Image (tube, rainbow, N blue to C red):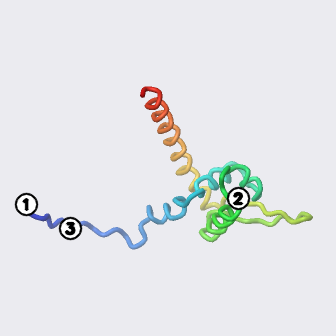
Amino acid sequence: MLPRRKNRVEAPPERCPLTECLSIIGGAWTPNIIWYLSQRPRRFTELKADIPGISAKMLTARLKRLEADGVVERRVEPTSPPSVEYRLSALGQELKPAIEAIVDVGHRLKELNDTTDTET
């Protein structure tokens, strides 16, 4: 039996930046919402149409969470009837390159999987 090593590993900071960021973008549907809002501001019904499969309840919950986290801004338009528009905040705009990088890797993974599927 091998002896157990006594490596001392520095503990991560109490609020690890990676964990902090992933807690925001790691939720189901959240990257999709950020992706579509990075293109331009959207109303609720536009986002619902943009993201097939998301329920109104889930979209509402995700938007509220993103707003509470400071990633999304909600603006009530003074129209009759009033409409609500969502847009990325300055902090939300900073997430845009991360989401774009994930999309780029997703395209490459999809191509790899498509190639593997046709070979079998």
| Residue at point 42%, 28% (across, down) | 120
Q: Secondary structure at mark 2?
A: strand
Residue at mark 3: 8
Work out whether 40 lies above or below 112. below
Q: Residues within 10 Å of mark 1 (few under 14, many from 20)?
A: few
Q: Amino acid at mark 2?
A: Arg
x then y, percent, for residue 42: 74, 55
- Do the numbered discs 2 and 1 sit on residues whose CB atoms are within 8 Å? no
Disc 3 to disc 1, how far (Cα)? Answer: 21 Å
N-term mark: 2 or 1: 1
x then y, percent, for residue 106: 51, 42
Residue at mark 2: 87
Residue at mark 1: 1
Disc 2 to disc 1, how far (Cα)? Answer: 58 Å
Q: Amino acid at mark 1?
A: Met
Q: Residues within 10 Å of mark 3 (few under 14, many from 20)?
A: few
N-term mark: 3 or 2: 3
x then y, percent, for residue 80: 92, 64
| Residue at point 47%, 27% (across, down) | 118
| Residue at point 70%, 49% (across, down) | 50
- Label 3 or label 1, whichever lies nearer to me, is 1
Disc 3 to disc 2, how far (Cα)? Answer: 45 Å
| Residue at point 30%, 69% (across, down) | 11
